[in-house]
Image: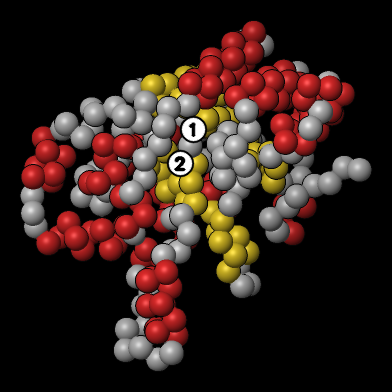
Amino acid sequence: LNLRLISSARDLVVDPLEPAEGDVLIIAGPDYDSDEISNSPEARMVASSKRSATVNSGIRMGNGLRGLNFSPLPGAEKEGEVIEEVVGDKERSTIFFTRAAAEEKELRSYNAEKVPEILHIATHGFFLKEQERLAKRIMGMQRGSQNPIPPPADNPLLRAGLAFAGLNPNAPLLGEIDTDNDGVLTAMEVLSLNLTGTRLVILSACETGLGEIHEGEGVYGLRRSFQEAGVDSVINSFWEVSDDGTQLLMTKFYDKYLDGIPPREAMREARLEMVEDFRWSSPFYWGAFAMVGRRE
């Protein structure tokens, strides 16, 4: 049985655009505790300020974002190294950012000049649930409140994102420091990227496949944002998989894809090989990842 996931009927149409000729861009294992950004003059000024604007910004950004804190992912850095080696063996160009260098600005700087063929991000992903207090406010608006505009924090694209270097010390300052390099790439910010022609984005992180369903609109989340930014296909995950399992699956996938096998078929063959290995046969190891995108 070979199932294909699509986000809309347009994915059934072959894309006439030529794929991007950029590099395989790898961002893996960020140092979430890096204080390079939080120690900047701008950030120190914000941290020492007691202005009410800080409170208001907390409402704009959503209190949940300011409470983000992530532990290191040593397996993610190793994953990036393995992929860099596999891609290099196929004589393909790679650019690899890890630890303190895995900042949000590096992705933006690269994208300002080039469009990657493949973008691989191995880091923590998150999807924050709607706050109960916020939900009550929205319900009040639906009952005829004088303020018909819902607060921005209700936007599910601001509650889904990826963690980059420096997030932990930056989190309390979110909304006050430069949002282009604050350690969080929200689904809303993904929409500002130009990824037209990028053949594949791989989000090797837990919960990157989650989102919020809006009637008549489908699921809002990271996957949808990357597709709206121009990406042909997205591989995302629905739960956290062991480091070794993820590295093995991705190694098998890249080895096949770079040999010319279409990405969907390459992922299918990589999974089947894991099923045949008793150690990795459980769906826990290979079933977390789903690929959604255009017809190849």
Q: Secondary structure at mark 2?
A: strand
Q: Is residue 252 found left or right of 25 in the rendered image?
A: right
Up-down relation of residue 257 to residue 230 (above or below): above
Left or right, residue 213 beside residue 182? right
Residue identified by numbered label 1: 123
- The tag earlier along the polypeptide, 2 or 1, is 1
The N terminus lies in which quarter of the figure? Answer: top right
Amino acid carrying mark 2 in the image: Leu
22, 218: nearer the viewer: 218
Left or right, 248 with respect to 271, comes to left
Could you say which is closer to the camera, residue 289 or residue 88? 289
Residue appearing at x 48%, y 46% in the figure: 126
Pointer 2 and pointer 1: residues touching (CB < 8 Å)?
yes
Q: Which residue is mark 2?
A: 162
Name the kind of residue labelled 1 in the image.
Thr
Q: Is residue 132 above or below residue 32?
A: below
Pick whichever, 243 or 183, lies toward us. Answer: 243
